Image: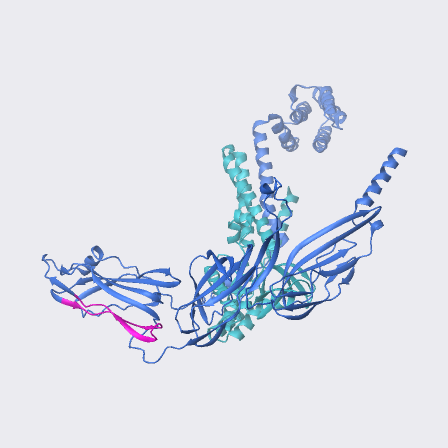
């Protein structure tokens, strides 16, 4: 018993020692970038946000602000790309949805985000929660379920509660799986150049199947050296140079 | 065994024969490109086939750049042939190439990757000509004509663009493209396409007609590009005998011919509006009539009447607006949301817009409402006109009720509820976020975090379940309870004895022997769930041996010593030794349990 408790303590300590200790340096940099934006120095502001992202800061609001800076600069492609990235962390943000819609309307092709697949539609809440929130939900349900199981040993009448919590716990695990699958299936890419020709093969002289313009959103299906196979819909797909797309 | 090996050989042979990638049948791979014709017109479609012989497992060919053609894949077909013992496989990729320009073009080599090598097809030269006799329609199975209602028009004037498809044979899979420069023309549809029969040059044609309304937006000489329709013409084939009784059941067989028909581009001169526009002219172009009427002409102060202004005509009636009439404070005015209806008559877009104003008179007296004026430009007459309503008079009597007029109440009760519409003046993005607490770095969860978070409740459950189970057993399982507490009880009693050996209570060896024997037997009894006090030393040994205790014999010997002491007491020195031996023995038995 003592050994088991020691093991538990070890894990708990490992957990707490691995908790991130947030510094304030990058927050100062964010303040600077926001100030530059407020002063309408959008290019410098975008540069500051970009440098934070390059440093490994992962935050939905950071991508949102960067998207705004690009919109102000008239760069629809990078703006849409950053809004799409921001959705990964802040999927329920109304301002983000509105700005993304605005940016799509500004683009020439006006390609909307693809509709969620049947699994994502069935587990609709997984679209409104980010991965981290889904994990915390599962952790919470896991804790409550095991507590209910312990209580059930004392109070057998709690069987219904125990079963309900088990169902919820399984549902939360499936939701995480659905989220992982939908994120791995949907690899969005956005055209960053003014115009790109979608080719039938991985060669400059291959047949041009159709053209896409800055801000057009597609799904990457295959990556091959300097080429990406992109899909626009069920029927239209082709190859584009990697450097013309942001993903 | 022989039969078995024979079967295996047969299976291997079959596998080798049937497996399309079998190395035995690996053939020389060759790739060829063929076309169904080298010379064609802009109306024709070129069939390009790329045949890959020797394998069927290749990715689709990479076609060369063909900017002068529109390329559509027409599927693949594969074939496997056995001639004597020779087997040959091939796959054909088919494409339809629709020429976009005239001239001589070279279809460059298409590339195919197979077995790690790249194969290229030979280049093919194609000549594309204008369709013969394009200006005339003599003896053609199908042709298209486009017309424009006028070659000159003012900005904003409605033009009718008509696309006509004439065809003598059945046409299917129609795909029409009508290219317009959206910056120069605004386009509106004029209803569903019409279908009728018409005789042209003495030949009866089926005609499909589609009309569009075009509104020029820029002055200057503009060209409306050629419209293009892609279709399959179904030519009847006379292969079945007319006497064939099954012919009428299976219908007539047809041969499909894929065609692309283009119209001639049209030009139009768009004129700007002349000078001298009347005051208040708001780019209304067309011909409109205006009328006004009142719901009630005799009413009391506080009553409501509705002023209805109707504008009808052709042109951009939708864009007409009216401000509230200036009634100099004699009336309270509640404007309603205008209603607009659009109809198409003889390919002309006609509109009717109705403006309603609820009027509540504030003072008694005879009043005349001012005229409503609408300046517009009539392109038919090439001049500006002003449409006006007739003046309307009202007789307003004093209110018969003595109460003060409550305008707000009146409007709510009597006036039609206005339908305000928020006008969108501009669109913009939402601002950036500046709250720093939102910008915490999101890191991925470490495996240790996940393992601890998900594992710790399980761990705690196991501990609590164990404790609960043990508590329950201690409560209801007497044997378990005795077994668990045997050592504790024996140890307590031995310690107590150890403290008392020097005192007078246990100075008597007889008493000492009895007490020690009782402790030992009680311990064994608790451990084995027996009535320990009642069992003999031999029984203790037997039971302990049955329970696989190694110290069973030592226990018996110690109990016999105790009994000897009890019944034949010796010196006190032996009691301490016995006590120590008893303590050691119980520890030993506890370990063995």
Viewer-proximal residue, B340 or A40? B340
Where B436 sits versus A180, above or below? Answer: below
Query: Residue B579's x, y, as percent?
Result: 70, 30
Q: Report the coloring of the rendering.
A: by chain
Is B312 magenta? The answer is no
Q: Does the image show residue B99?
A: yes
Viewer-proximal residue, B503 or B496? B496
Q: Does the image show residue B440?
A: no
Q: Quadrant of the N terminus of chain B?
A: top right
Chain letter corresponding to the colour blue: B
Magenta-highlighted residues: B367-392
Query: Residue A244's x, y, as percent?
Result: 62, 68
Residue shown at the point (37%, 60%) measured from the top left: B345
Looking at the image, residue B352 sits to the left or right of residue B144; the answer is left
Magenta stretch: helix, strand or loop mostly: strand
Residue shown at the point (70%, 56%) measured from the top left: B93
Query: Residue A189's x, y, as percent?
Result: 59, 62
Q: Quadrant of the C terminus of chain B?
A: top right
Viewer-proximal residue, B502 or A40? A40
Chain letter corresponding to the colour cyan: A
Kindly give the residue lying farthest to the front in the view shown. B202
Looking at the image, residue B330 sits to the left or right of residue B111; the answer is left
The quadrant where residue B216 appears: bottom left
Residue shown at the point (76%, 53%) measured from the top left: B90
Kindly give the residue lying farthest to the right in the view shown. B2
Viewer-proximal residue, B126 or A70? B126
Where B315 sits versus B402, above or below? Answer: below
The quadrant where residue B63 appears: bottom right
Count of marks placed on residues = 0
């Amino acid at each position: 018993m003592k050994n088991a408790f020691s093991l538990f303590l070890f894990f708990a300590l490992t957990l707490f020692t691995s908790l991130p200790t947030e510094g304030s340096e990058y927050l100062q940099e964010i303040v600077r970038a926001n100030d530059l934006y407020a002063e309408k120095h959008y290019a410098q502001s975008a540069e500051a946000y970009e440098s934070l992202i390059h440093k490994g800061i992962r935050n939905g609001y950071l991508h949102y602000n960067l998207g705004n800076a690009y919109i102000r600069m008239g760069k629809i492609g990078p703006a849409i790309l950053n809004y799409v990235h921001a959705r990964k962390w802040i999927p329920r943000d109304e301002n983000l949805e509105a700005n993304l819609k605005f940016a799509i309307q500004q683009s020439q092709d006006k390609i909307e985000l693809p509709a969620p697949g049947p699994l994502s539609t069935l587990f609709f809440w997984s679209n409104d929660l980010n991965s981290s929130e889904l994990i915390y939900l599962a952790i919470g349900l896991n804790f409550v379920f095991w507590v209910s199981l312990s209580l059930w040993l004392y109070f057998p009448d709690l069987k219904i509660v125990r079963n309900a919590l088990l169902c919820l716990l399984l549902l939360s695990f499936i939701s995480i799986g659905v989220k992982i699958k939908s994120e791995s299936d949907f690899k969005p890419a956005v055209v960053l150049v003014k115009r790109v020709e979608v080719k039938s093969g991985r060669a400059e002289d291959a047949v041009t199947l159709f053209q896409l313009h800055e801000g057009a959103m597609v799904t990457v299906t295959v990556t091959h050296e300097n080429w990406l196979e992109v899909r626009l819909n069920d029927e239209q797909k082709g190859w584009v140079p990697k450097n013309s797309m942001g993903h | 065994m022989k039969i078995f090996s024979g079967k295996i050989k047969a299976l291997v042979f079959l596998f080798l024969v049937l497996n399309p990638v079998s190395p035995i049948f690996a053939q020389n791979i060759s790739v060829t490109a063929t076309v169904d014709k080298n010379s064609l017109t802009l109306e024709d479609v070129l069939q390009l086939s790329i045949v890959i012989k020797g394998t069927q497992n290749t990715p689709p060919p990479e076609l060369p750049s063909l900017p002068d053609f529109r390329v559509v894949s027409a599927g693949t077909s594969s074939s496997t042939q056995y001639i004597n013992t020779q087997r040959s496989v091939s796959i054909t990729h088919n494409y339809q190439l629709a020429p976009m320009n005239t001239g001589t073009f070279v279809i460059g080599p298409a590339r195919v990757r197979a077995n790690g090598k790249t194969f290229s097809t030979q280049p093919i030269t194609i000549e594309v000509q204008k369709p013969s006799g394009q200006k005339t329609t003599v003896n053609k199975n199908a042709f298209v004509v486009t017309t424009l209602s006028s070659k000159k028009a003012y900005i904003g004037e409605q033009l009718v663009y008509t696309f006509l498809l004439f065809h003598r044979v059945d046409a299917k899979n129609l795909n029409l493209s009508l290219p317009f420069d959206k910056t120069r023309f605004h386009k509106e549809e004029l209803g569903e396409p019409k279908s009728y029969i018409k005789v042209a040059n003495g030949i009866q044609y089926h005609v499909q007609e589609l009309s569009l309304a075009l509104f020029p937006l820029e002055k200057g000489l503009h060209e409306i590009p050629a419209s293009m329709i892609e279709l399959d013409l179904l030519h009847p084939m006379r292969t079945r005998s007319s006497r064939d009784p099954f012919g009428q059941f299976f219908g007539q067989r047809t041969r499909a011919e894929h065609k692309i028909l283009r119209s001639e581009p049209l030009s139009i001169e768009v004129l700007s509006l002349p000078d001298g526009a009347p005051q208040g002219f708001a780019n209304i172009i067309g011909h409109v009539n205006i009328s006004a009427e009142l719901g009630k002409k005799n009413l009391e102060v506080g009553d409501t009447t509705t002023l209805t202004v109707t504008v009808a005509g052709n042109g951009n009636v939708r864009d007409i607006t009216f401000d509230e009439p200036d009634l100099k404070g004699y009336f309270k005015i509640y404007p309603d949301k205008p209603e607009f209806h659009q109809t198409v008559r003889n390919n002309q877009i006609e509109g009717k817009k109705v403006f309603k104003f609820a009027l509540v008179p504030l003072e008694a007296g005879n009043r005349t409402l001012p005229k409503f004026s609408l300046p517009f430009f009539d392109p038919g007459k090439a001049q500006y006109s002003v449409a006006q309503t007739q003046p309307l008079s009202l007789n307003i009597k004093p209110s018969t009720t003595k109460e003060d007029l409550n305008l707000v109440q009146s409007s709510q009760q009597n006036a039609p509820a206005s339908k305000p519409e928020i006008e969108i003046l501009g669109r913009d993005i939402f601002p950036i976020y500046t709250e720093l607490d939102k910008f915490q770095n999101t890191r991925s969860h470490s495996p240790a975090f996940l393992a601890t978070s998900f594992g710790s409740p399980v761990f705690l459950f196991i501990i609590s379940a164990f404790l609960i189970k043990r508590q329950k057993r201690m409560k209801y399982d007497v044997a378990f309870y005795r077994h668990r507490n045997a050592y504790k009880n024996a140890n307590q009693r031995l310690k107590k004895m150890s403290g008392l050996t020097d005192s007078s209570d246990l100075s008597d060896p007889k008493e000492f022997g009895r007490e020690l024997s009782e402790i030992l037997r009680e311990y064994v009894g608790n451990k084995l769930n027996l009535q320990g006090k009642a069992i003999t030393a031999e029984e203790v040994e037997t039971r302990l041996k049955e329970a696989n205790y190694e110290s069973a014999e030592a226990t018996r010997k110690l109990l016999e010593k105790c009994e000897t002491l009890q019944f034949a007491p010796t010196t006190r020195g032996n009691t301490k030794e016995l006590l120590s031996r008893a303590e050691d023995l119980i520890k030993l038995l506890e370990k063995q349990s």
